Amino acid sequence: MKKQIWADLDSTQFSSVEEYVSKLGDGIKKPIHTVLIANNGIAAVKCIRSVRKWAYHTFGDERKIQFVVMATPEDLKINAEYIRMADQVEEVPGGPNVNNYANVDLIIDIAERRMVDAVWAGWGHASENPRLPDLLARTKSGTVFIGPPARAMQDLGDKIASILVAQSAGVSCAPWSGSGLTLDYANGGIPEETYAKSCVNTIEEAAVAMAHIGYPAMIKASEGGGGKGIRKVTRAEEFEAAFRQVQSEVPGSPIFIMKMLGGCRHLEVQIVGDQYGQAIALYGRDCSVQRRHQKIIEEGPPIAAPLDVWYEMEKAAVRMAKTVGYVGAGTIEYLFDERTSQYYFLELNPRLQVEHPVTEQITSVNLPAVQLNVAMGVPLHRIPDIRRLYHELPYGTEPIDLDNTPRVAPKGHCIAVRITGENPDEGFKPTSGGIQELNFRSSTNVWGYFSVGAMGGLHEYADSQFGHVFARGRTREQARRELVLALKDLSIRGDISNARAFLLQLLETDVFKNNKYTTEWLDGLIAAKVSAKKLDPWLVVICGALYTAHTTATRRYKEYITYLERGQIPPRELLAIKQSADLIYEDVKYCVSTTRSGPTSFVVFLDNADEANRSSVEAEVRPLGDGGLLVLVDGRSHVCYGTDTVSGLKLIVDGQTCLFTTEYDPAQLRTPTTGKLVRYLVEAGSHVQAGQAYAEMEVMKMYLPLLVTETGKIHFVRSEGSVLELGDVVARLELDDPSKVRRAATYTGKLPAMKSPHVKSDKPHEQVREAVLAIQRAQAGYHCSQLEATLDDLLHSLRDYHVPLLEFQECLSRIGMKLPKDVARRITDELDLYKSAASQERVIGGLVDSTMVRIKSMLDKYMQEQLSPPKHKEFLNLVAPLIDLCRKYEGGLDKMRQDLFSSFLKHFLEVESRYLDSRESVISRFRQEHKNDLKKVYELELAHFSGLQTKLILTILDKINSSDDGIRPYIYLLHDLADLPDIDQLREVARKGRHMLTIFQLPTFEQRKTLIEQALRTKPLDLLLREPAAIFDVLTALFEHPNSSLRQSALEVYVHRTYRAYTVTDFKATDAGGILRADWNFVLADQWASSTPENRRSAALRESMSDPAPELRKSGSISPVLPSPRTFAAVKRAALPRVYTDNDLASLDARASDSGSEEGDKPRYAMMAFFPTEAEFFARFEEALDKYFRPASTGKSRIERSVSALDGVPQPEMRDVVAIALQIAEDSPFLEDSSAITTTQGFLRQYLQKLRILGIRRVTLITIKPGRFPRFYSFRERLDYAEDPIYRNVEPPLAYHLELRRLFTSNYNIQFVPTENPQVHLYVAEEKGASGEKHSCLFARAMVRGGHMFATSTLTDYLVNEAETVLMWCLNVMELAMGNAKFKGTWNNQIFLKFIPEVVFDPENVEHLITELGNKYKRKLQKLRVGQVEFVAKLKNPNSVAKPTTVRFFASNFTGFKYNADAYVEVKDVKSRKIVLVGGGPLDGKETNEPYPQPTAVMKKRVSAHQQLTSYVYDYPEILEVALQNAWRRYYRDRGDTNRAPPKDVLIATEVMLENGKLVDTVRPAGQNTVGMVAWRCTAYTPEYPKGRPLYVIANDITYQIGSFGPMEDELFNKVSQRARADGVPRVYIAANSGARIGLASEVKDKFRVEWLDETDLNKGFKYLYLNDEEYANLSRLGSVIGQKVAPDRWQITDVVGVQDGLGVENLKGSGMIAGETSRAYAETFTVTLVTGRTVGIGAYLVRLGQRTIQTKGPIILTGAPALNKVLGSKVYSSNTQLGGTQVMYHNGVTHQVVHDDLDGVAAIVNWLAYVPARRDEPLPLLDLLDPIDRTIDFEPSSLYDPRHMLAGYNDPARGWVSGFFDRDSFTESLGGWGKTVVCGRARLGGIPMGVIAVETRTMECVLPADPASRDSTETVLLQVNGTL
């Protein structure tokens, strides 16, 4: 019954506040409808929530009480929660709280204007200012203050007064500055004199008090609170600073000092008093977990004190409240000593406290509502919540004896934590900033509230606490656990820091669990630097790397799309998939790089090792909707958020904040947080000590000292009062010890082993999907570290018969329930049948195919027989996945594999075939094709530019090559690959495709092996000895043949073919003892006295080793410039006294390399042994040595004879050789060069003495693996049997083929460079004796192998492909080497190729081959700076019976445009017995072993010019000559005379120079110019002027002072141009320059010194430059410098004049002169300019003034991109091309014609001159007619047509040639990129030159490109109306 009454009363509701007050009020009845909250943050939030909750239960309307809130601009900006909750908002001034929430006058003004009924001040701000209730009481409306009256607030709220009251009431107090003072409060209040005696006002008074109280003590401001105005001092040195800080934090507040009681608990009693003198205690709270006296964790009820002591503390608190007539909620705080059970009064807070919800949780009393009730005049015993607490009906009115009536026991236990914006890792420094996420989950036992929400924040004037979380439980432990779980679920993310993790750690400590803490506990932990449990550093580092990489990748992608949207060309850098970062975490630097392996996949590498040994971790990163990242790493997922701050990257990983810092620099004193700089504590320039406070800043209403971390002199940067952001530099420190700048230690270990983010499946069909996905990602441009392994996994999985079975079962699991039962059963039966049969068969291709056919037929039959036609479509849709699977596996797993590989090849072709034009054109086309999905453009670009596709396709082609299928299924795709153009990225694939197609027609290794085996059985060995075919790999493979005689025959053939340069005698092969071995003697062939055919058999043989290329490349169509056939004709006509043979060269080379000159005619001995395994080699090698040479004459072995002759007999000469052939296994360490060499060297050195006793000069190791060409390693006695890398992978007897002797000369120092390709031998050579920078070059040497074993029809094609293959090998090896910084600067590199077989070729055919290869690989040869390619071949004319002739071909293209090919026959001079070259070229008469010469000065200059993307100035006459010859060829071709050669002499060019100010002709070698301008007077013989036409050519020399204009350059330019004008002939200017010269006075540059501002930090700059007395005297005497003396022996340089003329502004004086001259030249004669390389400043003006411009890739600019970027403050322009490239100048009418290179540019000039008279005012040049004058014009205009068709004609697919108005092929358009509604140019009509202007008939698009300098600029497309000018 009582419960029912309670329930009914609890549901009671009132209609109005008046009714409520009328019923429950007593004498004072003051209804309150509107409340002004004079507070912000969580105080305002808590008040509104609590009162609205009470109002809803009381009135049924939560807004019965209206709230007006105050809001500063800062609170509005951060989206404060209380503002959103309020009914009305009053905006108030921002800044510190004295401007707003603590401004009493402002609060009164708002209260009166808003006519509120009451003001609630909460805590902090003005809540304890007695002026507020006092002034409110005086308002006209009598606004109520919800709180105590002014006097009680004044007395009890004042800490000093409250202690005096407590002390007078007999409450125990700690020793303090007012100890012993008493008063009679009831009769006199607080006497001023008593109050004053308890205060300390000065440092001196405080010192006196401290002398009585003692240390430690607390200095307190009476009006302080919340951690403000309180400082602990433990020693005298801290006292003065602490006292001043307290004064500053609470200005004007009285200060007192109290003894600090250690080891105590902070317990407080919650009291409430009404307006009728009643007061009660609502239990209390334990707030002992404090930091700097600011509460962190609160709990209640307090259980530290015994109940009897606690009740006594409560009664004392109530007694004090009644004594002063306290009204409202307040708190009396005690210090409780558990050791003595004594308590001491601390203070009374006359306000509601932050932690009051703890009391609400254990008492169910709504304290803000109680405050409101008290303010409205409701006595305590009538307030419903209080009545419930005392077991009374809630809405009763009868009195309650509140002092003696028992209360309801506390409802369990409650623990609360404050959520603050402080950083525990930095001493709880306050932080401010935005909050992006705040996610808190309430539950039955957990509750919390926050002052801000998501997208809110904390500003610098806000309180640091922005949330409070409470947990309740039946016991303290249950409450603690609930709180721990709640904090773990709490998610806070933003710019601020928070203590969530630290609080969790506190709650989990044993001290807290056991309730054994005191007020000093937390400060002790902080002092000990105990921090929250941190994440694994590796997780943090990896997440940091992934965040950086993902952010960068996202930014790059967005920037790329933005460029496309604006019509701009995105930089290629935006396609990068790699991001490197140096992450410093906890003072350790981690150098990491992250590469994208998929759209959301990444691989993190630790960059502290080489590529092969780098450790890595795979991860997945997926973006979340709130800006975070879901990171999957090591098999687990983590949520990560990041923010880039001034201090570094701030990362939040799983809710924990981690900071990546920059290098520690204590000289930069930065702010630890946002705030205001209050004042400096030291003088500027003063000396400060480490740890000393130098300034104070105000943060969150607190004063924070700023400390210096090192000792030094301080200099201020910011002024007092400045508002500071996090990381701002406040001051700088001149360190006493500069070494204190600490650099983080770089981590040198490896990444820990981590799991893959995805669990790899063990099901084969899913493994297939994973592998295909990885390959598709690689094709899309993403990283794949194990391409080959992935392909191997795919191939392996596709051999598993379970693959189709599992895919069908997976499909049936999805649709099986929807299938008709009969269909599902039949499919299952078929699969069971397949599984049973497949498990028993090895070949399942047919089985898979038949199963698919049956399933497909069954489905079709069921549909036809069981279903009506209307249901067919529904059935087909249902079974579509099954039909797709049937089609997928038709043909079996082999067919599926072929389809997959074909799809990969097709994708490659689809992407790469689009990139046959310039990137700008390609992107423009892509943009149009995918304008609605620009992401597709990015994907295509990424796939192309990553380069991974090429590597993947080459690997796939290797797999296809080695597969059982062969290449037949891919034959059409291979043809497409072989036809790819000559582009760097495609060349290797194209060559590979061609190679595979060629090899497809040739015998396999097994076929060749079978042929050789048959020949060894049935043919005479002589035939095999003479056979030039590639058989070394086959012969060595036969060493293990089961037939003993065949093994020995193979070994004999091998030896004779190897020692072809020698005469081999006494050969003996044996299998005795189980070791296949052979012995023989050998001597140089031409030293053999009795020279018979039998004895010289091996010397007559030709070596022919073959290893068909795994790569082929076909290049694009660059028109070849054919060499003159004279040299080849000379070769054919030469009368040769004796043709040089291989034996001659072999003899020479053998002496140089393998024989000493003194023993060249002495017979030598050799032995070769074969070991089938490595184990047998190690075990029986000594046994083989013991059998070393046992002649029949002595019966003793060589070692026996050597040992017997030791006494007095000379040791054997080191002349003989041992060869070891070793068969190696698939997993043998001997597969790797390094392992094979190291192992063998160590093994041989065990037999060092024995080998020397035997006289063994060299041991050769031959490693044999079937299908692979043998590898060779030579170990020489002079190296203690260490390997000689010079002869790696070549048998020393065959080394003469490589002519290595030409390298080892006095011109170069030679070093061997290891290569991946054993067929190419690479050496780096450094110039000897050169001063300054030495020239280095690479020498690549290789042999081209082939043979007659193949069909004759195939041989020629095979050799051509083989030559191309070997050339490509050399180029690839060079390219790889030049990727190394050591070889990057090499140039004039050389390639030497020796054709081993006789080549059945006419010399003209060889000429064609060399020319074709040279032109095809022209660009690659130029890129790799190859100066010369040398071919050596023995040619046999197919139409002659004469012996083969050894011919050398030298192909060079030094200019890059004129291809020179010289041919020489090798002839042996009978007298000198030397081999010389005969051919009429520059090497005529030179010996074949002539050393390679050092580069000339001209060659060096030519390279310098090429590096600057132009030609060397002295090469232009030759380029002009080539262009003229090509013009003649076109002339003859157009007239049908294709075989006619151009005239022999087409150009006479005479250089002109200045001499005494006049132009004179000169004949001097190239490169002798002393001026950076060169000019020629030329006569050009053209088809229009076959007798010659004059012209002048002027060109910058970019190798002379970077082509700059000085006085002499200007003068020469001016004089030559004047001469051209005077003669009335064309003036050609070739522009490649750097503008006006700004030089350096070298005599000063070598001597000046620098006075730095700070020698330890040169980045700070310098004061001045200076010289000493002697230097200044010498230079000033020369007039080079002007200066002033600033110190003894020190002259400050004020001016640099320089001795040499042309260093400064004088270079500008000629600019106007040559500009004016160019304008006059344009007016008076024909001027044309070719822009190449670059033209800058005055050079650009000359181009524009000359009007007619032809441009290569070189830009035309006034100022360079780097300089403009500096002016603009960012990298706006990525290159000079963006400023003045062809895409700018051509489309703006500056450039008339765009050409590819300098040759095309000069050819365009020649073409232009064809329309110009030879001299001014002469008739136009006429040509004989190609088209008759009276011809009919075929073109018929339509309404819209291309005017170019009308002018020039065109080819129509149906009609053929449609003639136009002008002569065929005579029209050349100019300014094609500008003014597109007009077409202009030049043409011929009846052979007569004419200018052409026509109007477009179509509407044209004019594209205005976006300006890179403007981020808002976009590409604009304007439609230009047709028919207009």
Image: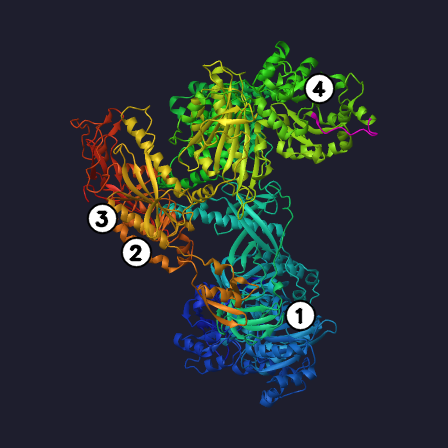
Task: Give the amino acid type for the residue marked by disc 1 in the picture.
Answer: Thr
Quadrant of res 314 = bottom right
Which mark's residue is nearer the viewer, 1 or 2? 2
Query: Mark 2: which secondary structure?
Result: helix
> Tag 3: Cα neighbours inside 10 Å, few (<14), some, or many (≥20)?
few
Q: CA distance from mark 4 to mark 1?
A: 95 Å
Q: How many marks?
A: 4
Dot 4 or dot 1, earlier in sequence? 1
Dot 1 or dot 2, earlier in sequence? 1
Dot 3 or dot 1, earlier in sequence? 1
| Dominant secondary structure of the residues highlighted in magenta in the image | loop
Which mark's residue is nearer the viewer, 2 or 4? 2
Q: Is residue 1216 magenta?
A: yes
In the image, the segment drawn in magenta is 1205-1219
Residue 1712 is tagged as 2
Q: In the rendered image, which residue does mark 4 sit on?
A: 1078
Q: CA distance from mark 1 to mark 2?
A: 85 Å
Query: Mark 4: which secondary structure?
Result: strand
- Residue 602 in percent (x, y) is at 54, 43
Q: In the rendered image, which residue does mark 3 sit on?
A: 1723
Q: In the rendered image, which residue does mark 1 sit on?
A: 519
Indicate left or right for 1294 with 1374 as reference: right
Task: Give the amino acid type for the residue marked by disc 2 in the picture.
Answer: Gly
